[in-house]
Amino acid sequence: MTHSVKVDVWSDIACPWCFVGKRRFEQAVARFDGEVEVEYHSFELSPETPVDYAGTEAEFLAKHKGLPTQQAEQMLAQMTELAAGEGLAYDFGRLQHANTVLAHQALHHAKAHGKQVELKERLLAAYFEQGLNLNHAEVLADLAAEVGLDREALLADLESEAHLAAVRADQEQAIEYGIGGVPFYVFDGRLAVSGAQSPDVFVSALERVVQESGQPA
Amino acid sequence: MTGPFELVGDADAPVCVDGVCALPTDAVEAVPAGADTASTDDQV
């Protein structure tokens, strides 16, 4: 019998550790002897981020943390190197800051149409590797079409805010659970892992959930 | 963490919180490694 584990993931597409964590989690899933169902939940890291912020990522970071721009650039360079170790080509020089509430609505639309995992990957790559501007519905619709979603249907849902309540519900659940940072993974509603941890940690959590659930080997 | 689940692994793994992410040279900040956190402010 095949083991099956449901994993709920709170994350934001503007979260560099979420993409790194996604790769590490994927390594764990590849090693796990069973099936894993992933559902992504919305977590806005910075809901007050302005649409179309004009500065660079280093300038934004320097301002936010009160650091010299040069130091912020060094930190981003090290994050880029760390991500490269996971096979990711972060390009903070091209990155365009986004208020991610539209992207979260798009991900809920994708979930309703069975394409959430595919769109999540596409949006993370667009943001961190390709410097696409995810502030805008038209860009999100283009990316959605790339993963097989109906472009016009997504635009209609974004226009009507059809999934905004679902985004807010995810955020309220995060608060209820005490989730303060992302990525955050919940395994079968019983075990949780916070942060971009090693594949070993994720494998251990998956295996423990199976053992404790009484699923036959 | 006050959720109805047991937290496993490294409690200090990197995350992003309140719009700020623990970055590689950011060790002096009390942000868990490997994660980003939400804030009402800007984000990295």
Image (tube, rainbow, N blue to C red):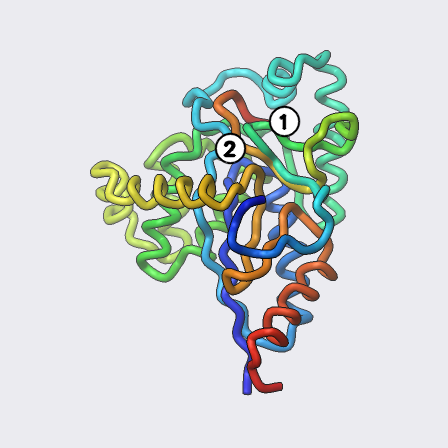
Residue A168 point in image, percent of width and height: 35, 39
Q: Which of the chains bears the disc numbered 1?
A: A
Query: Please, is residue A118 above or below residue A160 in the view?
Result: below
Query: Please, is residue B2 above or below residue A69 in the view?
Result: below
Few, some or many residues within 10 Å of mark 2 (<14, 14–19, 20+) = many
Is residue A102 shown left or right of residue A57? left
Residue type indicated by callout 2: Leu
Query: Please, is residue A122 above or below residue A49 in the view?
Result: below
Q: Out of A194 and A66, give the one closest to the viewer.
A: A194
Residue A181, image quadrant: top right
Residue type indicated by callout 1: Gly
Residue for point 65% across, 64% down: A205
* Residue pointed to by mark 1: A93
Q: Which of the chains bears the disc numbered 2?
A: A
Badges 2 and 1, same chain: yes
Q: Secondary structure at mark 2?
A: loop
Q: Quadrant of the C terminus of chain A?
A: bottom right
Q: Secondary structure at mark 1?
A: loop
Q: Out of A138 and A62, give the one closest to the viewer.
A: A62
Residue for point 49% across, 49% down: A122
Residue B12 point in image, percent of width and height: 72, 42
Residue A91 point in image, percent of width and height: 64, 34
* Residue pointed to by mark 2: A45
